[in-house]
Amino acid sequence: MAMKYVDEFRDPELIRRTSEEIYRLVDPDCHYRFMEVCGGHTFSIFRFGLQNLLPANIELVHGPGCPVCVLPMGCMDDGLSIARQPDVIFTAFGDVMRVPGSQGTPLELRARGTDIRMIYSPLDALKIAMDHPERQVVLFAIGFETTAPSTALTLMRARELNVPNFYVFSNHVMILPAIRTILDSPDMRIDGFIGPGHVSTVIGVHPYELVTEHYGKPVVISGFEPLDLLQSILMLVKQMKEGRAQVENQYSRVVPWEGNIPALEVMNEVFEVRPFFEWRGLGVISQSALKLRPEFARWDAEVRFQVKGVRVTDSKAAQCGEVLKGVLKPHQCKWFGKECTPEHPIGALMVSSEGACAAYYHHVHLRQAIGE
């Protein structure tokens, strides 16, 4: 039954009719720029070739919705400085293992003998700490509001079990401040947003009213299947045609208007907002990230290891910032597909499968290279 449910959102006839409806409604004299904020949407757009089903005057702009992609080099260096300390086991998710810092990636450091382990869940890191009470185990926590509740629940579990050798280095960030920064950029013109589906399952729909009420830009929360995204683009076109700027929820089968209340409650219990946090490509954004509350200082890696919070400037040759803000397309970066590839990423956008550069490389660049 579940498979049928997915197939319905990939139905060729429904996709064709939706595409035709978009063609019928667009103003041929208008150029539409819609930003998909979520990296999962970027991946789906390239994977299914959705741009080929849209009129030429609808431009999809790839936003900063990949947490690995916006992780600044300084945070990676801070994490690896902890990993190098005696008796530390450093744990991180798979994508993080390949994020370049100024001294290399976690994967490269592990190859040189540092105890760095890939995990699939924050609870994996907690279990490692319980299995190795003689070691200091650090979780490099990353992600938008989507993954923050699982980190929070793991910390609450560590407190409940009184695990003394488990620490969290929080690099969790929030989506709305990033959108606000993009909209405040003087060189950026965005007509509407395809809102992130995964983040919205946690924070809900109503927070995006900031975008509609303060900036007058429509937002449509979208699912990830081809029909989801085409329907969301159709809803944005309809709003612009009717002169509206509202938050609409195309992904209502998954995303509740009010969000996931229990998840928000555990986040609020464990985290507080940082005054400032640096984003790769976007610079320092105020009130945009989460740190542990003082009540959890005992498990805070920043307290235990006196993290300095270094800032490291990205290579000027890499143009990750311009791609993240939608100023450049991935293939317009002069390093794309040459010095910078998924096998040897120079910028973080080429690391994660949800990064705009990696998605474009796998689903467009390689096909063009072999003449498909």
Image (cartoon, rainbow, N blue to C red):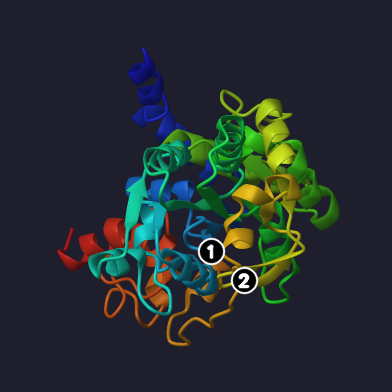
Q: Name the spot of residue 205 as percent of width and height, x first.
A: 71, 36
Mark 1, Cα crowd under 10 Å, few <14 / some 14-19 / many 20+, is many
Image spot of residue 193 (x, y percent): 64, 51
Q: Is residue 250 above or below residue 281?
A: above
Element assignment for label 1 = loop
Quadrant showing the C terminus: bottom left
Residue occupying the point 37% across, 28% down: 13
- Between the residue at mark 2 and the residue at mark 1, the CA separation in whole angstroms equals 8 Å
Give me the residue at 30% from left, 63% from top: 107
Residue, disc 2: 282
Task: Evaluate whether residue 29 shows in this view.
Answer: no
Residue type beneath disc 1: Val
Image quadrant where one finds the N terminus: top left
Q: Which residue is label 1 attached to?
A: 70
The reply to whether callout 2 and callout 1 are in contact (CB within 8 Å) is yes
Give the residue displayed 52% in from the left and 52% down from the top: 142
Q: Is residue 192 above or below residue 112?
A: above
Q: In the current view of this chain or complex, which residue is farthest to the front?
A: 134
Q: Amino acid at mark 2?
A: Leu
